[in-house]
Amino acid sequence: MKIHLVFVLFFVTHFSLFSQIRLKGYAEACISPELMHGRWDARWVSCPDEPENVYGIYHFRKNFEIKDIPAEFIVHVSADNRYKLYINGHLISLGPARGDIYNWNFETVNLAPFLKTGKNILSAVVWNYAEKKPVAQISFNQTRFLLQGNTKTEKMVNTDHTWLCLKNDSYILWEKPVLGYYVAGPGESMNASFYPWGWEKPDFDDSTWKNVRVGMEAGMKGARDYPGRLLVPSPIPPMEMKQERMATVRMATGITCPEDFPKRSTPLLIPANSNVKLLIDNQQLTTGYFSLLFSQGKNAEIRIGYAEALYEEEKQTETVKSYHLNNKGHRDEVVGK
């Protein structure tokens, strides 16, 4: 029986919190005065029985119940190195905005629009690139996650021993030699058969997850004799989120693509035991995250790479190809590059 891989390509750019879009200064206005100085009740947490200073990806969950949905349910969130925060399966925040250990940013978000009476689920995924982190990432190289409720109403969700965690074993580093000075982070390889699909959803079974390892309490910048990350409110508003579909396929080998793919949401069927390559051109500069939607394709492998432009081919023999790394030529051209 043939195995088909069905996928649609688009960019996810700019992260909008739906009704949460904030202007600069919103976060500061929402922070309780009691949190603006000194130490917080919430603790920096991590995953037990795991080294804290090596590459790893970790998931965190917290179950809590509310009787009545308030107008505001404000929390402050941060992590080392990076996080995504979900409430009842909805992506609500990601960060932190980059800083340093003397100015460690946290984001402020209102969870109220996504709460429901009864059981609710807060969940987060945290990346720690440790010694492989990008040059711009200043860090203690320790995996950490933090969430602090703004007032007594929200303190039930503070990070403490009641939070659960799981290490995601589906990811490993994927690195290739790079000529010249390289400042970005590494690539990653993910084995989908090991991924804990649905981990952020309310109905996910987390009965085998462990309770977190509890570290020191968080502290705002200016807290006396505080040896950890000095917290400051993020000085920038959250990024906007929208989907921007890629523009056109410039080259395709091993398959004939539909005429309007990928500009329009169109299935692309890849037969089993085939090798397909696509060169997709967005035709304009876009800063965002590449998103791939696929189904089936057991034992298939998908590799994704990206570049500003292709390099001109310098010379070619029957066995050797070389490329002139200082010459991209006309950046709209793809043939012979």
Image (cartoon, rainbow, N blue to C red):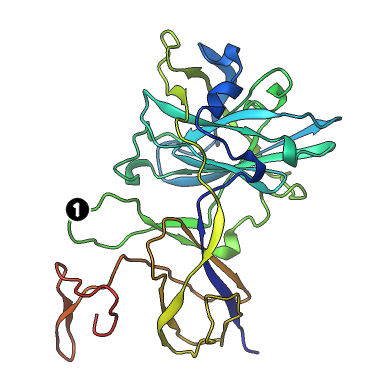
Query: Relative to 148, does residue 88 appear above or below in the rendering?
Result: below
In the rendered image, residue 59, in percent from the top left (x then y), is placed at 59, 44
Q: Residue at x 66, y 28 (%)?
A: 74
Q: Residue at x 39, y 25 (%)?
A: 103
Query: Relative to 120, does residue 148 appear above or below in the rendering?
Result: above
Please state the total of marks drawn on the protein image: 1
Res 327 quadrant in image: bottom left
In the rendered image, residue 258, in percent from the top left (x then y), is placed at 54, 87
Left or right of 35 in this view: 149? right
Q: Residue at x 41, y 60 (%)?
A: 286
Q: Three-letter amino acid code at disc 1?
A: Tyr
Res 305 quadrant in image: bottom left
Q: Is residue 324 visible?
A: yes
Query: In the rendered view of the protein, which quadrant contains the C terminus?
Result: bottom left
In-front residue for pair 257/176? 257
Q: Is residue 44 visible?
A: no
Query: Relative to 218, does residue 140 appear above or below in the rendering?
Result: below
